[in-house]
Image (cartoon, rainbow, N blue to C red):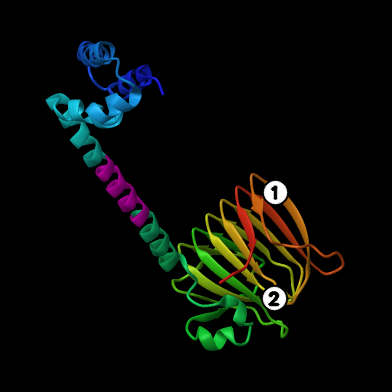
Amino acid sequence: MKANTYINELEKELSLLPKKQRDEILKEISSYINESQASYEDVTQRFGSAKDLALSYLEDNPALKVKKTSIPKLQKFFIGLSIFSIALVILAFFLFKYFTQDAFDYSKYNAKSIQNKITQNWKSLENIKNIEVHQASAVLYWSQDNVSKYSCAKEARRSKEDSLLVKQNTCYFILPKKMFLITAFQSDLTLVKPLYATDVKIEQAELRIAQNENEYEYIFKKEHSKIKSLKSVKGNIVISIDAFQAHVNKYEY
């Protein structure tokens, strides 16, 4: 290997030095090679590898010492910041899951058993045809005995003669065979094993359907909405869903 190769290697290793200082070092080493007719091996034996020689010059430069020591500190700072950010994301995820998780698995109950689980404030839905859910959570079951009632954490009121308004509330409904129009705005709506045809209109809301072993025929009218994991089977109970800026999913606890 030619001695000039050593000069080329050294020039690359000295790239952090100012040009004037770099040129002086290269000139000095080149003079030694020319005067002594040294080979690559001779130069390496005399000065060490180009990398080692360059490092000795770099360590003698105070300005580069500052840069050299500050880079690892900066790296440590960003690594620490990244770990902290990841920890915050994980914490936020678990907090979200904790505060938004259902109180229990709604899909394991039906119109009869839910009344044993939720024992307070059951009221009749007599003469109600429409259920309006605003900024609230509502879980709906269907009765084979044509029973219609509801239980809410707070008082619900009639917005019209035949409409019940549930606002900023948590409610459970038992619906009869007759058709209800269910509307939801900025709410979490869960349908548990519907037994009869159902008409749902949602806006900026999440609708979850616990099918269990049942199959349904879904009729969707959607705009800016996402529908996942629901399979429509013709000839079964019809669930009509009008969704705007909403999410419709299969129920999972």
- Judge whether 123 appears above or below 67 on screen: below
Residue plotted at (27% across, 22% down): 14
Quadrant of the snapshot with the N terminus: top left
Q: Which residue is mark 2?
A: 212
Task: Point out the frontmost of discs 2 and 1.
Answer: 2
Q: Which residue is mark 1?
A: 222
Residue most extreme to the front:
37
Q: Amino acid at mark 2?
A: Asn
Q: Look at the image and give the residue range highlighted in magenta.
A: 75-87
Q: What number of labels is visible?
A: 2
Q: Disc 2 to disc 1, how far (Cα)? A: 24 Å
- The disc, 2 or 1, on the residue closer to the chain's N-terminal end is 2
Q: Between residue 36 and residue 233, name the one nearer to us.
A: 36
Q: Is residue 246 visible?
A: yes
Question: What kind of element bears circle 2?
Answer: loop
Residue plotted at (35% across, 19% down): 3
Q: Position of residue 67 (x, y in %)?
A: 20, 30
